[in-house]
Image (tube, rainbow, N blue to C red):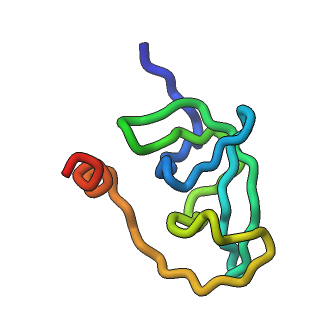
Amino acid sequence: MIHVIQGGLLVPLRCVQEMQGNYNVFVVNEASEVEFRKIEVVSTYQTSYMIVASGLEPGERLIYEGLQKVRSGARVNPVVQDISISESENQDNG
């Protein structure tokens, strides 16, 4: 069975924190400040992505490294890195 999720986004699994059934991410806004954001996760995709139905907009920047060190409201100097599905899957497998 195939489900269509309008506006769904693929998010790297390592960006998502789960606590007691709630899913959250850290988003870096335009002012380079960190925002803690609750998201709705629908499912997983392959082995390293989650499908997010709400809580994020396309193009928003997520914290990918150093999640244990960052806090909401902190100012950061982000380094943007594009992550493709094939690159991530290859890193996981080799």
Residue in view at x 45 percent, y 44 percent:
49
Q: Residue furthest front?
A: 68
**Image height of 76 relative to 54, above or below:** below
Say which residue appears at 66% left-offset and 55% top-offset: 25
| Residue closer to the observer: 4 or 15 | 15
Quarter of the figure with residue 74: bottom right
Can you give x and y, in whole percent of width and height, for residue 64 in the image? Answer: 51, 64
Q: Residue at x 29, y 49 (%)?
A: 92
Q: Residue furthest left?
A: 94
Question: Along the horizontal axis of the image, is 51 left or right of 23?
Answer: left
Q: How many marks?
A: 0
Q: Quadrant of the N terminus?
A: top left
Front residue of 60/21: it is 21
Classify 76 as above or below 71. Answer: below
x, y percent for residue 78: 56, 81
Left or right of 1: which side holds 76? Answer: right
Q: Nearer the viewer, residue 8 or 11?
A: 11
93 displayed left or right of 24: left
In the image, 69: left or right of 59? right
Residue at 56 percent across and 64 percent down: it is 59
Instruction: Tell which residue pokes out farthest to the right in this image.
Output: 73
Residue extending furthest toward the bottom? 77
x and y percentages locating residue 71 in the rendered image: 74, 70
Which of the 4 quarters of the picture holds residue 30?
bottom right
